[in-house]
Amino acid sequence: MTTSRFLKACRREPVDATPVWFMRQAGRYMAEYRALRERHSLLEICRIPDLATEVTLQPVRRMEVDAAILFSDLLLPLEPMGLPFDFVKGEGPQLEKPIETPADIDGLRTFEPREALGHVLDAIRQIQHELAGRVPLIGFAGAPFTLASYAIEGGHSNNFARTKALMYGHADAWHALCEKFATIVSDYLGAQIEAGVDAVQVFDSWVGTLSAADYREFALPHTQRIFQSVGGRVPTIHFGTGTATILAELSEAGGDVIGVDWRIPIDTAWQRIGDDRAVQGNLDPTVLLGPSHRMFSQTDDILARVGGRPGHIFNLGHGILPSTPVEHVQMLAQYVHSSSRRRR
Ligand code: CP3
């Protein structure tokens, strides 16, 4: 397993071809996922290890991907903290009672992930058994800023006004909230590693809404604590979107691999991140909608900018969109392998 292309690239070792996997590689763009979703809710798939295993393996069977990612959701830790939620069709997650005041934060519980989220750990063991070493398995969790944004907004937000109002207006309560998240996420990722994941990705999907100074003050210390806690055990990936202006700070918080989106050329991003890290990215997911010649030319542009440097993992800048043709995803994975081989 340690000889896998993906894990080698995480360690910046040379590889025969650029490893590739896709955020949201399991999901609505695949007919077999949609068929399962007709019978089960998203939360059921997350909670029943047989179903989570099946969905995790669906893209591995169909695509030349070099890693599997655990099928789960970023928000699962919210419920055992005392923040129940559901997924509403067409609208995404909705919390029953989002955080409004510092007193709401005092009332949140920490919990033992081996009990409250034991089903996720069971799914990891089952997936590893079925993968049988074919490709490594990536576990994941959310970073404190992104988790806090869902806990406070109650769902998706465009401007994060409530989140920032609490952050600026009640800085002590904000830090207390993020400390809770950092403790929970460190424990939860530690438990995922014990259960057998080969790497972990920390998603700070919405942190690009912060200035560099605010990132340093309100997010960096908490995310850094997570990487200090889990780093060195398995490779770690630190991902965010809209982060072009805060890549140096994001890298300082930690991660063996830094994920970058499409808003910045990958070579410019790598300069800001530094030579001592691997980089994951960074094709715009909308390019997969077509035409395919553009998907290939943009992929070649990314590979040319990387120029064969060890430590590149090909991915999209964010998740695959539900309207993406499955053949495009298949062709893209193959193309990354063949085109990067030709360049070696
Ligand atoms: O990448 C994978 O294949 C693994 C599965 C995965 C899911 N969620 C399943 C899912 C992962 C890695 C996540 C992480 C996640 N969840 C993030 C961080 C990644 C990112 O996209 O930035 C976030 C912000 C969430 C919270 C969340 N879950 C939202 C905002 C939504 C609704 C958005 C949407 O696409 O509808 C979800 C639902 C969700 N989680 C789906 C999937 C496959 C949608 C599919 C469905 O409804 O069946």
Image (tube, rainbow, N blue to C red):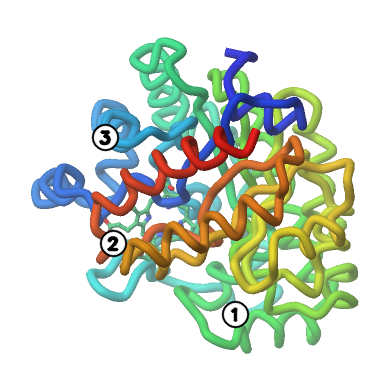
Where is residue 50 drawn, in percent x and y? 25, 26
Reading the image, the residue beneath label 3 is 62
Say the numbered circle drawn on residue 100. 1
Check disc 3 and give the amino acid type. Arg
Q: Nearer the viewer, residue 171 or 293?
A: 293
Amino acid type at circle 2 is Thr
Q: Amino acid at mark 1?
A: Glu
* Callout in the foreground (2, 1): 2
Q: Secondary structure at mark 2?
A: loop
Return the mark for residue 332.
none
Q: Badge 3 local density, few (<14 within 10 Å), some, or many (20+)?
A: few
Left or right of 127 on screen, residue 23: right
Q: Secondary structure at mark 3?
A: helix
> Crowding near pointer 2: few (<14 within 10 Å), some, many (20+)?
some
Q: Position of residue 52 (x, y in %)?
A: 31, 34
Residue 276 sits in which quadrant?
Answer: top right
Residue topped by disc 2: 324
Relative to 158, is 57 above or below? Answer: above
Residue toward you, 108 or 310: 310
Q: Residue 297 or 24: which is nearer the viewer?
A: 297
> Quadrant location of residue 93?
bottom left
In screen coordinates, is 39 left or right of 14? left
**Quadrant containing ligand 1:** bottom left
Query: Dot 1: what SS?
Result: loop
Name the foreground residue: 127 vs 83: 127
Residue shown at the point (84%, 38%) measured from the top left:
228
How far apart, in angstroms, are the residues tagged by discs 3 and 2? 15 Å
